[in-house]
Image (cartoon, rainbow, N blue to C red):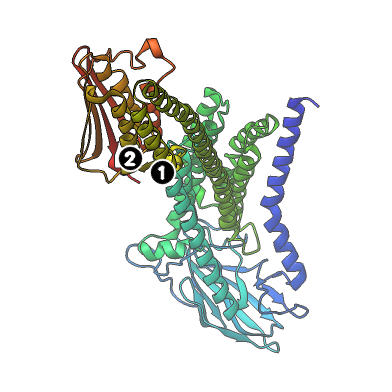
Amino acid sequence: MSARLKANLYLIAAVVFTAVLIFSPFAAGLLNKAVVNCPDVINGTVDFKDTKITVNNPLYLSGEWVRFDGHIITEAPISKEGKAELIPPSLAADNFDFSTPSGSHSSYRITVKNLDFKNAVVYIPHFAGSYEVFVDGVSVSNGENRNAFSFDGDKSYDIVIEIDCLMMPGIYMTPVIADYGYIEIYTDIATTFRCAIVGIVLFCGVFIFVYSVKKNSLFTSKWLPLLCILIALRMMISTEGFSAFGFLFPSVNYEYITLIICISTFIIKLVALLFYTETLDLKIGNNTFAVLCAAFLGCAVITAFFPYTVFSPYFYIILQAATLPLDIILLSRLTDCMVRKVPYATTYTLGYIAVIVGIMVDCFYTNGLIPFIASSYMPIAFGLFVITFTAIFAKKLTGIYTTALNAAELKNELTAATTAAMISQIQPHFLYNALNTIKYLIKRDPKTAEKAVIAFSKYLRGNMDSISQKHPIPFETELAHIKNYCAIELLRFGDKLNIVYNTDFTDFSVPSLSIQPLVENAIKHGVTKKPEGGTVTVSSFEEAEFYCVVIEDDGIGFDPENPDFAPDDSHSHIGLSNVSNRLKIMVNAQLNIESEQGKGTRVTIKIPKEARK
């Protein structure tokens, strides 16, 4: 199968899957109607004779209501500013009469028969305009309040709904009869759920933005946080979300928020396109971008200059459908990524499908085309969108953390191996030089040689553990190594060698056998090369930020540009680069060499105080 054919099949599957999800609320509404056996309103009358009444199954009053111009029970409650006094906190459900002109002030009436429903409430879920419901002339609910009413199956009742819409064309959502307690609990749960999803989306957006900025971006685009903010705003201004929004901004009329809801669809999808394009390096032509932006601009102009089109559900749906070409284009690019096995391509595709489903279901629902309370579809879909990218983000974080752990482990292993290699060089080197000194003394001065053997045996007995130590040791322990070594050298060279210790401060740590080779070099390649000999001084002291060790001699000096000195005896000593590397690796120390031929050498070691053990 060719890659192109495979990509087309993936695209078809994605489109079909998206369509199934979008139309699932329609199926849920029909199933609910069949289960409850809820009848339609016919010629202004509805008979519930064979209807199954349960507290958790609302009865949707869809069908042919009798419409009247103006109010038939009360006068239209219009304020001096021309705005309805009743401001509902949310939207809602089914399609009725679209022939009514915008800004309707009218009444709708039906007669209910054979309804035995105690503690019931009659209301319009999520209706944007202001309304009031009367049962036999008694007010039972409006956009702000709902009161329980008990229906007697032996009586018939007249239900009248009076509406005052600034822009909406009459009733376009399905009125509902439901159990009062069930609706109160459902509304609280739905509002809390939506607010929780909004909070999660905002938190994820801010977290991803802050972390990406600080950690040089796990996502290649900064459009994702903006997309999260837009999605959260979209949820806050519709259906249950408007309850919280209206509480914060009580003067905002929900009908006008519809304009923002319409425009937000285009903004969200364009930002999603920018995000996916940058993140997955999708190839979208400039002409395509131009067409999409022009379409967005055209829809924005229609919304701004012809707002009545948005308040007609038919035109609203048409405007939202204008984004479908963008969806098809983006889904085709995403399915191409799936075929090319781009990392996380399937997850990215599912995330965008969630955005499409959330927006379109909410669009159908809030325009009365779904005869079923489907306001939770959008927060669920948008929540899934955020979850998909949170999963990607978490995977990337896990990968980075695992890589960091592996790198740290490899670094530790490398450090241990390097230290072991250096120690393996130093140990035989020291033993060779000590035994070589004793060899010279045996020939020249047997009694002094005997003392040297005793000193050397004590050194081996007391310090063997330190010789093999691969971690920093107290400076006092290293100083004992130095003194034991120098004791042997003093026996060998006598008055030709002088050792001075100015070690006033010793409360810090150094790598084992890191100072002793420097003292050895000062003796063998410094003062003992001079006919008259000289002095080696070992000093230790404290500075503000460092612990310092200085080995200074007044010997023959050398060229600092060639630290591995003594070319005539290159295998008898450890180069300064070796010691410098060990100091750097183990305690992050700095080693500085100052030398002048004929005057001597000064080696300074500075150990940062944070490296103290």
SS class, disc 2: helix
Residue 510 as seen in the image, left or right of residue 23: left
Q: Quadrant of residue 43?
A: bottom right
Residue at the image position 56 percent from the left and 57 percent from the top: 379
First-in-chain label (1 vs 2): 1
Contact flag, marks 1 and 2 (Cβ < 8 Å): yes
Is 1 in front, or is 367? 1
Residue 177 percent across, percent down from the top left: 62, 75
Amino acid type at circle 2 is: Ala
Residue 493 percent across, percent down from the top left? 28, 23
Could you tell me how far apart the alpha carbons at marks 1 and 2 are, in whole angstroms? 10 Å
Q: Residue at x 50, y 27 (%)?
A: 290
Q: Is residue 440 left or right of residue 414?
A: left
Please, what secondary structure does the residue beneath circle 1 have? helix
Q: Is 243 drawn above or below residue 278 in the view shown?
A: below
* Pick the front one: 609 or 571: 571
Pick the front one: 126 or 86: 126
**Relative side of 484 to 321, left or right:** left
Say what amino acid the circle numbered 1 marks. Gly
Q: Give the crowd class for mark 1: few <14, some 14-19, many >=20 residues within 10 Å.
A: few
Q: How packed is label 2: few (under 14 Cα within 10 Å), some, or many (20 or more)?
A: some
| Residue under numbered circle 1 | 462
Q: Is residue 499 visible?
A: yes
In front of the other: 411 or 162: 411
Where the N terminus falls, by quadrant? top right
Residue 480 marker: 2
Name above or below for residue 68 compared with residue 432. Answer: below
Q: Is residue 98 visible?
A: no
Instruction: Please state the horizontal and vertical placement of residue 329, each as a whole percent of the image.
Output: 62, 32
